[in-house]
Image (cartoon, helix red, strand yellow):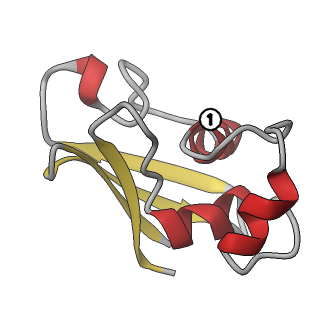
Amino acid sequence: MILLYKHKGKLMSRITADYKNQKVSVENFDDNPMDLAFGINTNPSFKDFEDLLELRCFPRNRDMMKLHLKELDLDYYDPLSIIMKTKGRLAGDDYELEVVEP
């Protein structure tokens, strides 16, 4: 799976995630760690990847979560599924996480 992490539409990081082997690699395209998918971490673990996915979603304990999931046509909270629907966009920031190759 390949995901693109962008800031204001500019590509910052390309993430390759292998779910079968639970491996992740990242290629960064900027020098500012504040704008990179994993900051200064250039060798992220699969757990780091899962944390990033969840970070780019609304919180698990969000009020009226079932309503938000229904709006996304999802039956349960799954960060990857949410990212695929929302591109990881959150109110108040200019970042997105787009799945380009499932």
Front in this rendered view, residue 2 or 61: 61
Q: Is residue 35 above or below residue 47?
A: above
Front in this rendered view, residue 43 or 33: 33
The reply to whether residue 78 is visible in this rendering is no
The residue that disc 1 covers is: 48
Residue 92 spot, x, y in % from top left: 37, 31
Residue 21 spot, x, y in % from top left: 71, 64
Viewed as shown, does residue 72 lie left or right of 56? right
Residue drawn at 68 percent across, 72 percent down: 71
Number of numbered discs overlaid on the protein picture: 1
Residue drawn at 86 percent across, 36 percent down: 61
| Three-letter code, disc 1 | Asp
Q: Is residue 97 above or below residue 74?
A: above
Residue 32 spot, x, y in % from top left: 17, 20
Question: Which quadrant holds residue 4?
Answer: bottom left
Residue 78 spot, x, y in % from top left: 77, 61
Q: Is residue 75 above or below residue 10?
A: below
Front in this rendered view, residue 46 or 5: 5
Residue drawn at 66 percent across, 70 percent down: 81
The reply to whether residue 47 is visible in this rendering is yes
Viewed as shown, does residue 52 lie left or right of 26? right
Residues packed near mark 1 inside 10 Å, few (<14), some (14 to 19) or many (20 plus): some
Question: Which quadrant holds residue 28?
Answer: top left
Label 1 residue SS: helix
Viewed as shown, does residue 67 lie left or right of 46? right
Residue drawn at 53 percent across, 71 percent down: 84
